Amino acid sequence: TAQEVYDAIQSAFMETYGVEAIPNSPMQVDDTTLEQKFYLSPDEVEGYAGAIAGMMTNCDELLVVQAKKGEVENVREALEKALQDQKDAFGFYPVMNNTERLDAAKVVTQGDYAALLIVGISPEDPDAAVDFSSDVSLAEDAFYAALK
């Protein structure tokens, strides 16, 4: 299920960092958020699970969707649009390493599943180089492993 895949991604972050993929006041995605932020109606999908950062200054989003049969491409397009919305809203707002988060972010698909991965755990050292591609890879690897 989408919940199981989402939980696998969260587990990967807990094992690696000791925190969930979205540590900044995560808010669970509900039907309203699914429609307004991700352009998907609950009627269009088999299931979903996700969270978004509850802080207005943070762009993190993690959403796993199980598409109805034959609809994964439409779901992928909706998630790509949601990713572009975040880039438009936060791309020039470097607070909380948003620029680097969005540079690494991606949408992935496997079978009837799609996921939007805007995740990244900021380094504790404020002078450390910031690159969230390994965090996105961690989420992506957990996504694929959960679907095997």
Image (cartoon, grey):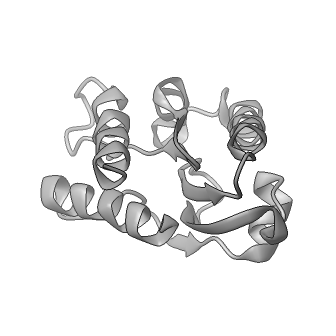
Q: How many marks?
A: 0
Q: Residue at x 42, y 63 (%)?
A: 6
Between 134 and 1, the one lying in front of the other is 1
Between 50 and 125, the one lying in front of the other is 50
Position of residue 78 measured from the top left corner of the image (x, y, whole percent)? 77, 43
**Is 142 located above or below residue 5 in the figure?**
above
The image quarter containing residue 12 is bottom left
Q: Residue at x 63, y 69 (%)?
A: 47
Q: Does residue 87 appear left or right of residue 116 in this picture?
A: right
**Is 92 located above or below residue 148 in the figure?**
above
Position of residue 46 measured from the top left corner of the image (x, y, whole percent)? 67, 67
The image quarter containing residue 50 is bottom right
Position of residue 140 measured from the top left corner of the image (x, y, whole percent)? 37, 39
Between 111 and 95, the one lying in front of the other is 111
**The residue positioned farthest toward the front in the image shown:** 69
Residue 7 visible to the viewer:
yes
Q: Does residue 129 appear left or right of residue 81 in this picture?
A: left
Position of residue 122 measured from the top left corner of the image (x, y, whole percent)? 32, 43
**Is 16 located above or below residue 18 in the figure?**
above
Q: Residue at x 72, y 37 (%)?
A: 73
Residue 23 visible to the viewer:
no
Q: Does residue 24 appear left or right of residue 50 in this picture?
A: left
